[in-house]
């Protein structure tokens, strides 16, 4: 199966709950999240819209692009825009079965993104390594597919 076909398994709308650890960016919280993945660029890209809502109504929004080379075992995630105004950085990654692991590096450290597909369920985790800090859990999300593929 090609990387593009693996990315297509994400297509659709997902909803779930996230546990976010305290960080320099926000306090710890349990949040609701909605993710939408749609195909683009003749099937070589999947666009992601992400919306996180906290109990107090605060939102974090992001748009990502997953790219896949036609003959490469790799995938790349680009966070193009988010409501925290982060500069776009690539996050190269690889697939192992139904598991996609990506690492986004920036001047402030690295974010390890982990997607695991299991039928109509998606688990998403982010671990952070900031400055000289050890790698720590940042976000753990569990989502159900509500429509799509």
Image: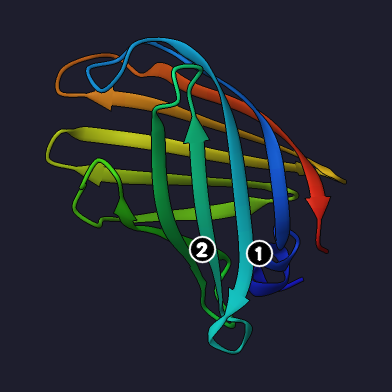
Residue 87 horizontal/vertical position (percent): 18, 53
Q: Secondary structure at mark 2?
A: strand
Q: Residue furthest bottom?
A: 42
Residue under circle 2? 75
N-terminal of the two: label 2 or label 1?
A: 1
Q: Residue furthest front?
A: 57
Question: Gap between marks 2 and 1, in whole Å?
Answer: 9 Å
Q: Is residue 58 above or below residue 76?
A: above
How many labels sit on residues? 2
> Is residue 147 toward the left or the right of residue 104 in the image?
right
Q: Is residue 66 above or below residue 44?
A: above
Residue under circle 1? 7
Residue at 41% across, 10% down: 28
Residue 29 horizontal/vertical position (percent): 47, 12
Q: Is residue 19 above or below residue 93?
A: above
Q: Secondary structure at mark 1?
A: helix
> Is residue 41 toward the left or the right of residue 115 in the image?
left
Q: Quadrant of residue 118?
A: top right
Residue at 46% across, 30% down: 126
Q: Nearer the viewer, residue 140 or 3?
A: 140
Q: Nearer the viewer, mark 2 or mark 1?
A: 1
Q: Residue furthest right?
A: 119
Residue 43 horizontal/vertical position (percent): 63, 82
> Is residue 72 toward the left or the right of residue 104 in the image?
right
Residue at 71% across, 54% down: 13
Q: Quadrant of residue 149?
A: bottom right
Q: Nearer the viewer, residue 64 or 53?
A: 53
Residue at 24% across, 57% down: 88
Label 2–label 1 contact, CB within 8 A: yes
């Amino acid at each position: 199966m090609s990387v593009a076909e693996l990315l297509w398994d994400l297509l659709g709308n997902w909803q779930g709950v996230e546990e976010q650890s305290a960080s320099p960016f926000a306090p710890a919280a349990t949040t609701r999240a909605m993710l939408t993945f749609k195909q683009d660029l003749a099937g070589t890209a999947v666009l992601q819209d992400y919306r996180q809502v906290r109990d107090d109504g605060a939102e974090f929004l992001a748009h990502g692009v997953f790219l896949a080379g036609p003959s490469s075992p790799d995938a790349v995630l680009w966070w193009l825009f988010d409501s925290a105004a982060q500069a776009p950085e690539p996050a190269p990654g690889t697939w192992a079965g139904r598991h996609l692991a990506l690492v986004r590096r920036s001047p402030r450290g690295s974010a390890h993104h982990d997607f695991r597909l299991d039928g109509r369920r998606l688990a998403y985790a982010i671990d952070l390594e900031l400055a000289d800090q050890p790698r720590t859990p940042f976000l753990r999300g569990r989502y159900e597919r509500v429509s799509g593929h």
